[in-house]
Image: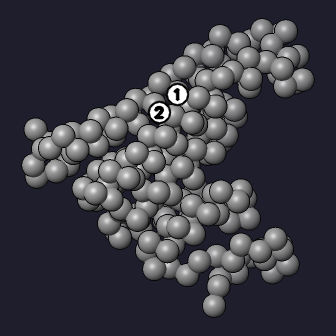
Amino acid sequence: MSNFFPTETAQTAALEEQYETLKGLFATYLHDSDELFQKQKGKTSEHFKRYLSMDELRTSPLHKKFYEDVQTCVEALAAGLADCPSPELAQAAAEPFFRQKPKSMEPNQRSWLIAAEALVIPLIPHLRREDAERFRTAYEQQYQWAEMMPKQRELYNALCDATGKKRKRVGLFASFLAGRPKEDD
């Protein structure tokens, strides 16, 4: 029985399986990176290695594998949603990307989760307008324009496009010279 489609076909079943895989990737990454952090926590030698950016926490292949696997999964979901539209599935798949990432979170884990946010862009055209609006509002509350990295700005502008809001200008000195973000005309 399908959770997101009125009838279940091989294609819709594969899409739901991709969604479960995506959820699993986030859960596994959070668990494994927390475990890695706990394993290194408190060791004096690890503090020295961390200072030199040589510790396992930063250099673990876990982070890059998470990023690449999420990218592959989202691309497959977006391609499948183009053939079998389901705004509910798109919304559920986008949720993990927009969860809060408090500054108190382990910095390396937080930075990889923020880097992965932009991977959700292919799913945005498949969202209902109200879901895109909710995600855009949450994103505005979590990040200020001046603090956003280029990929975060790209994601924010994609959300603006999906909701009909004016895009922020992406110039190098756009927010620096004016002291606040400028809107496109």
87 versus 15 height, above or below: below
Q: Say what amino acid the circle numbered 2 marks.
A: Phe
Horizontal side of 74 relative to 17 (left or right) equals right
Closer-to-camera residue (80/62): 80
- Residue 184 seen in the current view: yes
Horizontal side of 42 relative to 125 (left or right) equals right
Q: What residue is rendered at 58% in x and 44% in y? A: 116
Q: What residue is rendered at 66% in x and 23% in y? A: 61
Residue 163 coordinates in the image, percent (x, y): 43, 74
Residue 115 coordinates in the image, percent (x, y): 63, 45
Write down the residue under mark 1.
Answer: 30
Q: Say what amino acid the circle numbered 1 marks.
A: Leu
Q: Secondary structure at mark 2?
A: helix
- In the picture, the disc for residue 137 is none
Q: Quadrant of residue 106?
A: top right
Write down the residue under mark 2.
Answer: 26
The image quadrant where one finds the C terminus is bottom right
Q: Secondary structure at mark 1?
A: helix
Colour logic: one colour
Q: What residue is rendered at 29% in x and 43% in y? A: 15
